[in-house]
Amino acid sequence: MNTTSISQIAVWIDSVDTPSIDPPELPIAPRAADDKENPRPAKKRRIMQADLDQTPRPSKRLRDLDSVPQPPLSPTKSASSAAASEASEVESHRSGRLSPVKQLQLLEDFEEQPVVFCNFDDDEEGEEPEDVTAMRRATQQFADGIGILGYHDINAVVSALPPIDRMRFQYSWANDLEQRSTIGSMPSTAQILEIVETARKYDHGSGVSEDEWNSEVQHPLLKLARNTSKHRQTLDIHNVKTARIEPPSLARSTVPGRVVDYVVTLNPNPAIKQAWRHLRLLPGASIKSWNHTTRARHNPIAINIETKGPMKSWTDGKPQIAIWTDAWLKRLALIRGNTSGQWPALPLLIAQGHDWHLLIVSKNDQKMTIWQQIDIGSTRSCFDAVKVVTVLHWLMDWAERVWRPWLLSLPK
């Protein structure tokens, strides 16, 4: 504060008179002589009578607030406050402090290419695309436990399982060796059991941190699925939780730049390497990347995965994975050269503690729709953990059958 402001305030303080206000007179309620139900205490009566016997004081002047000079205001205070408020709001957006509900509302309200969530059985957003339906049906049967096992002798496996799993592993419709072997091999019972036991231990009491769930439960399950997948040589898993959307122009300015935890990517084959030579630079950047981040830039992303601890709602991950996917598709649109036409169905995964959920993206000229949700399994039991592995095997097979050819068909 400058010297002029201090002197002005001092003048204002000196001009203010000390207020003096008469206390209001206390009314004495009449009391009947025969009022026996509510007798007044004698001590209180004596104090009130003594107050009435005192010499009345002269009335005191009430302060006229309108006549009191007000302290001078800085001429730039309102402007600077507004600027600070606006800066704080922008920073709040960037740091992700908006609530998940607010972020979902912002995504829906985009004038160009809004991002909308809907249920599979909704018709408000139009008819479900055929490839979304195909992906939903294929993964739903695995989520129901159909054909998730591929053992020659199921009885030899059951003896090593905890009691909670023995009956379920013997369901006749769960074991289908021929179908199961087309997408991957069965992980060892010991490996599945180790992950399940760790997850159940971490779920006791107040549990452990989200990072421990990621590193000790969710990531090991992802690696196990990839290592037993039919396409383990051509796919990889990358941790992108410390990545950034690059360039920032790919992210919408009104929502925070959000990232996910893991991605399944395509390993570069000769066709991918050839296409890389002709790939255009990221806008405003001096390096190339297949993706909307420079992390794993030589490996095109196929499946995006967000993981949460059990103390957080899985719906907290919905705006997070939506913002990340929206920026990813904007990057692919730059490679594609236009946004017209229907895009292939794209899987998204959100793991919340034990529980895994599948969402499916469809995109056309008007909007991006995220269809929700299929509960594909959990790490509460070996049977449910095998469900997750089987769905991951199917999605990894989709990445090679559908996504790699579609990506290579794009003009570079």
Image (cartoon, rainbow, N blue to C red):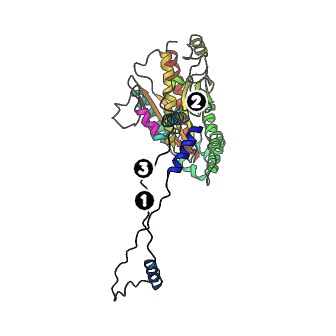
Q: Nearer the viewer, mark 2 or mark 3?
A: 3
Distance from Cα at disc 2 to Cα at disc 3? 69 Å
* Residue 133 pos. (x, y %): 41, 31
The answer to which image quadrant residue 270 occupies is top right
**Which amino acid does the dot numbered 2 rest on?**
Val
Distance from Cα at disc 3 to Cα at disc 1? 12 Å
Residue at the extreme bottom of the image, as rendered: 34
Give the crowd class for mark 3: few <14, some 14-19, many >=20 residues within 10 Å: few
- Check disc 3 and report its element: helix, strand or loop: helix
Q: Are marks 1 and 2 in contact (CB under 8 Å)?
A: no
Q: Which mark is residue 263?
A: 2
* Residue 24 pos. (x, y %): 41, 68
Residue 32 in view of the camera: yes
The answer to which image quadrant residue 299 occupies is top right
**Quadrant housing the N terminus:** top right
Q: Nearer the viewer, mark 1 or mark 2?
A: 1
Give the crowd class for mark 2: few <14, some 14-19, many >=20 residues within 10 Å: many
- Check disc 1 and report its element: helix, strand or loop: loop
**Which amino acid does the dot numbered 1 rest on?**
Leu
Residue at image point 35% right, 32% down: 125
* Residue 96 pos. (x, y %): 53, 37
| The magenta segment | 102-122
Q: Which mark is residue 62?
A: 1
Distance from Cα at disc 1 to Cα at disc 2? 72 Å
**Which amino acid does the dot numbered 3 rest on?**
Ser
